Image: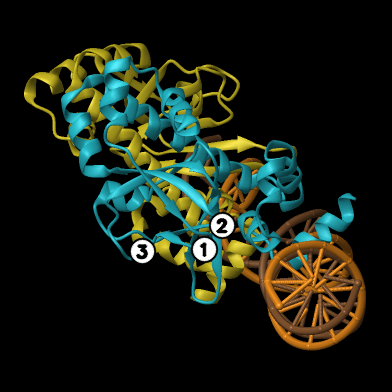
Chain colours: A yellow, B cyan, C orange, D brown
Amino acid sequence: MQNTLKSIKGIYPLKEVHLNLLLKKLKEAEFPKGHQIIRSGKVERSLYFIERGVARAYVDGKDNRITFWFGMEGDIILSYHSYINNTPGYESIELLENSTLYELRTEALEALYNTHIELANWGRKLAELILIKTEESYIGRLFKPAKERYIDLLQTEPLLIQRIPLGHIASYLGVTQVTLSRIRAEIK
Amino acid sequence: MQNTLKSIKGIYPLKEVHLNLLLKKLKEAEFPKGHQIIRSGKVERSLYFIERGVARAYVDGKDNRITFWFGMEGDIILSYHSYINNTPGYESIELLENSTLYELRTEALEALYNTHIELANWGRKLAELILIKTEESYIGRLFKPAKERYIDLLQTEPLLIQRIPLGHIASYLGVTQVTLSRIRAEIK
DNA sequence: CGTGGCTTTTTACAAATGTTAAAAAATGAA
DNA sequence: TTCATTTTTTAACATTTGTAAAAAGCCACG
């Protein structure tokens, strides 16, 4: 569970005791490529650490399906909206490869938050880190054109890009696959 | 301090003791319309509760300035990026009206997080709530056209809209002011 | 090897949005 | 009220992006 362990420790430093409290709650699970780990419209009761694999989150519009997040080794799969509001989420998350995940029930997590200040602060840090990542994607998308953001992606996530079909990347960048093809032709 | 108090309590229920620990750290301050309360490129050491007034956050691109957030009574002004990474932020925040704010030094807040589990969980909830708000704006922007989002804004924030110049709203919606004018002409 | 299915690129045309500039409307101070 | 300033709308044209369909490329399996 190397990747997961590194991820947990990287969020906020934990003493061995508190780390173990958290680890004890994890349950390993394997899922095949194409598996929908989160379904929109359902209240989610778990989060997952990606030990191995790639995932994407998307929302369905009237006549389109838009990808807004990719995750890989060390990332966390969680429908925040559903978890925080305790209501059905609007996003679905599917696995793009055969994957190994560690499941953590949100109920168990909440219990830890309420009894250990170290873990409450770990949870705070987790939310804060995801918050700024989300904000950065949001702002990047606001004022950089798709071409520039594609180049950014190539530089910051060269490995991730190779594991994901172009259509999903186009959707993530906010353009059609045709436009992304045009961009790729331009920058070659 | 009605609005601020309501905001703090609304985030996560606090007992009188812990609420007072937090309130003791607040410092009231008045600022004129047009004041820049957060400047990009600076490390921020405070957050502010808006007791009275309106604010907008923006980032500067090469040849444009994009508004990505509006806040009013009960909202919190905070450069998350700067606060969490302890590095200069990329956004600026300015007041669009004469405003009354309550300042809270992040140093004092951190100290409370490290000594009181109730406040650590309050801080976690704060980050979580802002996270899902950010995610919702992000996703809404992804797959709803500007017209639809303008109509949404009219319905969800009718009062706020009246207090903000159209150019800022257009920027927030991701279109030019000309396009927003066209939209307004259409839906009348 | 080939063949079928899937992904990516190309093309031609249509629609939406941006740019620039100017006119009209609204606002606020004297 | 009136005038000056700011904000909003309108117009004409250019550019970008989308749509739909066909072509090309890639890969796995028989």
Label 1 packing within 10 angstroms: few (<14), some (14-19), many (20+): some
Residue where numbered disc 3 is placed: A155
Q: Front-most of A45 and B37? A: B37
On the question of residue A164 being in view, the answer is no
Q: CA distance from mark 1 to mark 3?
A: 38 Å
Q: Identity of the amino acid at label 1? A: Gly
Label 2 packing within 10 angstroms: few (<14), some (14-19), many (20+): many
Asked if residue B1 lies left or right of residue B97, the reply is left
Residue C15 image point, x, y percent: 85, 60
Q: Do the numbered discs 3 and 2 sit on residues whose CB atoms are within 8 Å?
A: no
**Foreground tag (3 vs 2):** 2
For image coordinates 76% across by 60% down, the residue present is B180
Residue where numbered disc 1 is placed: B34
Q: Identity of the amino acid at label 2? A: Leu
Asked if residue B122 lies left or right of residue B75, the reply is left
Residue where numbered disc 2 is placed: B96
On the question of residue A167 being in view, the answer is yes
User: Is B67 placed above or below B8 here?
Assistant: below
Confirm whether circles 3 and 2 share one chain.
no
Q: Do the numbered discs 2 and 1 sit on residues whose CB atoms are within 8 Å?
A: yes
Element class at badge 2: loop
Residue A101 image point, x, y percent: 32, 26
